[in-house]
Structure formats: structure tokens, C-alpha cells
Amino acid sequence: MREKLVQHIAEWLEKEPLAPLVVDIGLAGREVFFAHSGEIILALSLSLPHLEDPLRQEVVSFLDVQWEEHFPLGSQRWYSPGQGKRRERHPLPPGLIEGLQPSTGPHPFANMYAVWSYAFYADRWDPVAKAWPEIRQCWEDFRRLHLPLKSRGDALWANAYLAGMIGLLRIAKTLDLEGEVAAVIEDAEQLARWCLERFRRDVARLALPIFENVGHFDRWRAEDMGGFFIPLPPHHKAKPDKFHALTPEVGVFLARQAPESVNAYLEFVERTLPGWYLVGEERQFHFGENFVDYPDFSLSIFQAQAFLGGRSVCELARWVDIPWCVGDAYFVQKLAICLHVAVCRKETTRHEDPRSK
């Protein structure tokens, strides 16, 4: 696992600058991945405990540039889809890039866990401390616009927002900002209650009905997707929101508070999504109008298997599969998760001797 991680990151940095990844799966529409620095900073920061110099220092230097030029909590976090070498394994149609814009995505507070990861794993507390006014402003803006959570977009990113609160709390404590800690804890508890209530409530709808016809299935799909998927605009688009953007901390919280629900969700995966981990595999649910799933689909379920299901390193290693592209931040996250689990559980596999700095 570590050899794969080193090889992929070394190739990634050698190929930079890279453009975001454009993925068009069908009627669900086109999405742009790795379109902002939050995803990049998170993935590479998580890889740092498993890298050695000189590559480790190269990664830290690259992260420093992203922090300065594409601050993850500001509007400058976005990369231009048309600038840099293409990530795709295939040529794009002429004219596709012109005018292409990434989706608006979540509130930048969803990147707060990445900010903490950069500070902690890269030992970059000084620049993070200097950015505290911007960090606090991002938090205040998030509170004003999104608390309490309401929309489907909020539901999709609820785990990221809760992880962001955890990251913010750690930052505030490290910087000795005791006056902020109580307010962060209050917001975190509100988010945690919302996530837990949803996690427990929606599990009751996981049982698949006997579909009378395609129309019956389409109505079911459009309404709630059985509690596992959340339908998203424009149409024929859905994502596994309970698993989306999971972190170890959020996973442990949900697994401890709702173990029966965890088992039910993971059983749904085993029963209905057998090829979830395969890159480029047929779309696992409602194949036809979309021919594959988006790259974040397999990452979400992979994180759930690791952080909710407590899967072994051997199982996780088998589910890593292959990267979508050069500079695949999700592939890096999967490998880093495997190595993290191996270290925490003191497991070894034929793939890796989990010694870490």
C-alpha cells in the first residue's frame, strides 16, 4: 500500500500543474472533481505520516503553495477547469472546457477538517494561526447560512460540516482560544444530533419494495431512494449521503451511537451494490441512463467500510482498486486510510508493513 501511495503521489507532483477531473456519466450530468484546494489539501495531508523525505517535504511544499494561492476557505480555493494538464484518461470533446464551471459545492466550512489536517500533519500551525480571522469569518458565515441544516445540499455535506466542527475545535484549543471553544462545542453538538437523528431515521426505509413497473421505481427513486441515496438535481442523480465525506471521528461517533443502523446500511451495500469499489464499473443502481457512478461514490462507501464497518486492512486493500486518473485525490485517501487503519489496529498484510512516522 505504501509503495502505491509513494508512486502515485510522486507521479502526481511530477505532472503538476494538473487541471480538475471532468466526469460525465450520462443523464445525471457532468461533474468536476478536484476542482478546489480543500480536496487536494485533505488527501495529501492525510498521506504525510506514511511518506519519507524527500517526497514528504515535496508534498509539504506543494501544500504550502495551495494554502497561499488557493486558500481553502476563500473564493480563491477554486481551480480553473481549463488550466493545467488534463487528468482524464481520454481526450475531451472540443469546446467542452470553455465555459465549464464546477458545481457550487458545499459551504467552504466543509474544508475546515482539511485546514486542521494541514496544520497537524504538515506542522503548519503558524500559517493556520495567522489565518484565524478568516477561519472565524468562515465559521460565522456557515452558522448564519446553514445552521440548522435544512436543504438536501446540507444533508449531502452534513458529515463534512460535522468533521469541520471537529477540526475547528482542535484548532481553537491548540491556539488557546478558550473564548471560542464553548461556542464551537455547541455548534458541533447541534450538528451531531442532526446527523445521528437522520442516520437512525432513514434506516427504516432501506427495505426495497417489489416494483410493479418502471414508473413505480422512478417514483421511489425520485422521492427518497429508500433512505440510502439522496436524489439531487438536475435529475437521475443521487449520492449515498449517509456515507459522504466521512472521517474517522464522525464514523466512530455514528458507529457507537447507532450500531444497528450501521449494520443495516452496510448490509444494503452488500445486497444491492456488489461492484461499488470498481473504477469504471457499471452504475450499481438504475443502470442505463448513467453508465458509471461518480468517483466519490466508491470513496464514500470505502470510508464507511473503514470507519463504520471496522473492516480489516486486507479487505480495505482489496477495495482500493485503481486510480481514476493521475493526481487522484480519492485514490490517495483510500491508500492513506488503509495505512492509518493498519497503524491504529497494528494489523499487517502482505501488502504493507504498517510502520509510520
Image (tube, rainbow, N blue to C red):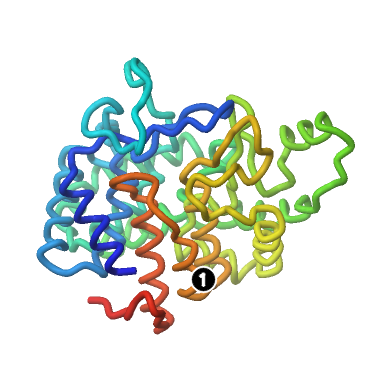
Secondary structure of the residue carrying tag 1 is helix
Q: Residue at x 58, y 64 (%)?
A: 254
Quick check: can you spot residue 187? no
| Disc 1 crowd, CA 10 A, few/some/many (<14, 14-19, 20+) | few
In front: 113, or 1? 1
In front: 63, or 144? 63
Q: Residue at x 54, y 72 (%)?
A: 311
| Quadrant position of the N terminus in the picture | bottom left
**Residue 250 in the image, given as x and y percentages of width and height:** 50, 61
| Quadrant position of the C terminus in the picture | bottom left
| Among the 4 quarters of the image, the one containing residue 102 | top left
| Among the 4 quarters of the image, the one containing residue 216 | top right
In front: 268, or 92? 92
Residue to which mark 1 is pinned: 315
- Above-or-below relation of 324 to 257: above
**Residue 256 in the image, given as x and y percentages of width and height:** 60, 71
